[in-house]
Image (cartoon, rainbow, N blue to C red):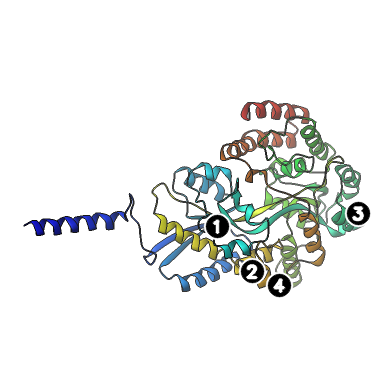
Amino acid sequence: MRKTWIMLTSILMFAVTACSGGGGSSEQSADAKDTVTVWTYPVHNKYEEDLKELLADFNKEHPNITVKTEMLTWAEGPKKFDVALNAGNPPDLYFHSVDGSYVDSGLAIQLDDYLTPEIKEDYYPGTLELGQIQGKQYGLPIYQYQWGWGGNKRILEEAGVDWQKIQQEGWTWDEFLELAPKLMGTAPDGSPQYAFVTEGQTMEIMELLSRNNNMPDVLNAEGEFQWNDDRILETLKFLETLRTEGYMPKETAAIAPAKRVEMFYAEQAAIISKAIPYYDVLIKQRNADIDAGTVQGAKVEFVLLPVPHHKDAPQKSTMGGEGYVAFRQKNDKGEQHAKNTFLVMEALSGAKAGNSANELVLPFVRNSQAEYFEGKGLGTPETLEAARIMAEHMEQPVVLSLDSALAAKQKQFKEQVMKPNIQALFTGEKTAEEIAAEFKAKGEEMFK
């Protein structure tokens, strides 16, 4: 009887241990079937093809792991992800730059324990840090994004603009304002040709300009509020001048990102904001389609330009890392699932994943990527050189140095204070002075 009781007790203890994984939650073995979800975006025109190839390679080595991907739209994807994150059910992997609000959720996976020496050594100096928040790794960057301005080569040259000198040496706000009247005219379809066009919905223009007036962001790396003195007023006045002088459309507040590009193609804009080197590839393809008769319109040539800076401030380029960020869910699936998620993350970030940087004409982040795509660059020599020079003036994203609470507050300030006020500036409802005063008051309230 005693032997029977001991045997039953042992069986029960084994059953409990097997169900609990030796801890408080269920755990799977490394070879168990698992599913990893990935939410991503059309990073470039061929990215869906890239994903299929990368995941096919991954499944050859890890047949037990199924990867389910969902392609989001740039317009609606961020909202969908925020809803999922707030509900405690984000995807395992999400394509984005790292964000303090993700860490603040408590669901972002810290990756330091999963990074092997080989992975760390493969990243160029300073690039792995683009996936860190306060020195802790939360994302693996695939490439370095780079935002600048873009010009129509024909319009610039006909106006006597030395765009090559600007690429080499940069330019100031005053120099741009001197050239702006020469960039006005009439587009081929008879509509106005503006000197400058930006979009009025996501507000990156303020970040680009303020960064070029000695303000790295709303906050600096120490978490100190920046938009509270003459520097922000000067920045707002420069933007206001573009509107009052008619150098940009009066309907800027209603211009969507896609419309901005359409205006550039239609030669209704001499220069557009938030241009990326990838335009080189897109415009070359568009020009080829025009030659083939599949697209109607005039061919244009693209010139990558740095954002002009205040005369008393250094030139700064807006750059950072974009790639995948890993998450747990409120109902945690266990450590083996987290390890499997990292395996997928690395597969989507390795050497062949460097095609994103190659297609987008952006800097690689890993040695293996540069070696794999050596001699296969798609950008023109002029654009590649301009991008290289702009990278020398990179401003490290402030959000990487902030704690999660400050990062979340900065994001809140941009959404609730900056965005409506800049739209009011675009429409003429508020003056630069009124907005600067509101920035100062709201900033002191939020960041005290």
Outermost residue to the left: 1
Seen at 80% across and 31% down, the residue is: 230
Which secondary structure lies at badge 4? loop
Marks 3 and 4, Cα distance to the nearest angstrom?
A: 33 Å
* Callout 2 amino acid: Ser
Mark 1 and mark 4 lie on one chain; the one further toward the N terminus is 1
Q: In this view, does 300 lie to the left or right of 162?
A: left
* Callout 1 amino acid: Thr
* Residue under label 1: 40
Mark 3 and mark 1 lie on one chain; the one further toward the N terminus is 1
Seen at 77% across and 30% down, the residue is: 229
Number of numbered discs: 4
The answer to whether residue 40 is seen in the rendering is yes
Q: Is residue 179 left or right of residue 201?
A: right
* Residue under label 2: 368
Tell me if mark 1 has few (under 14), some (14-19) or many (20+) residues whose alpha carbon lies within 10 angstroms of its own.
many
Mark 1 and mark 2 lie on one chain; the one further toward the N terminus is 1
**Above or below, 325 relative to 53:** above
* Callout 4 amino acid: Glu
